[in-house]
Amino acid sequence: MLGRSARMFRPNIQSVKATVDGRPVKLKVCTACLKAGKVRRRAS
């Protein structure tokens, strides 16, 4: 493969306050996971 740069695709990581086992926790989550509903933001 000639003329290709080694482009890296990195996830869009956000620091989010979420609830895990009933406790508020700060997590680093990708925006794709937030949109897919895999992680729920804590209701403030």
Image (cartoon, rainbow, N blue to C red):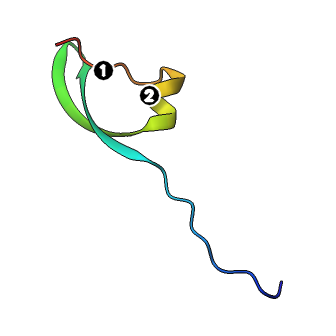
What is the number of the mark on residue 34? 2
Residue ranking furthest to the front: 3
Amino acid type at circle 1 is: Arg
- Please identify the quadrant where the C terminus is shown: top left
Label placed on residue 41: 1
Alpha-carbon span between mark 2 and mark 1: 8 Å
Above or below — where is 38 with respect to 11?
above
CA neighbours of label 2 inside 10 A, class few (<14), some (14 to 19), many (20+):
some
Nearer-N-terminus badge (2/1): 2
Number of numbered discs: 2
Few, some or many C-alpha atoms within 10 Å of disc 1 (few <14, some 14-19, many ≥20)? some
Seen in the picture, residue 3 relative to 31 is either above or below; the reply is: below
Q: Secondary structure at mark 1?
A: loop
Rendered residue at 82%/88% (across/down):
2
Q: Secondary structure at mark 2?
A: helix
Tag 2 and tag 1, C-beta contact below 8 Å:
yes
In this picture, is 26 found above or below 37? below
Quarter of the image for residue 20 reads top left
Mark 2 is on which residue type? Answer: Leu
What is the x, y in percent for residue 34?
44, 28
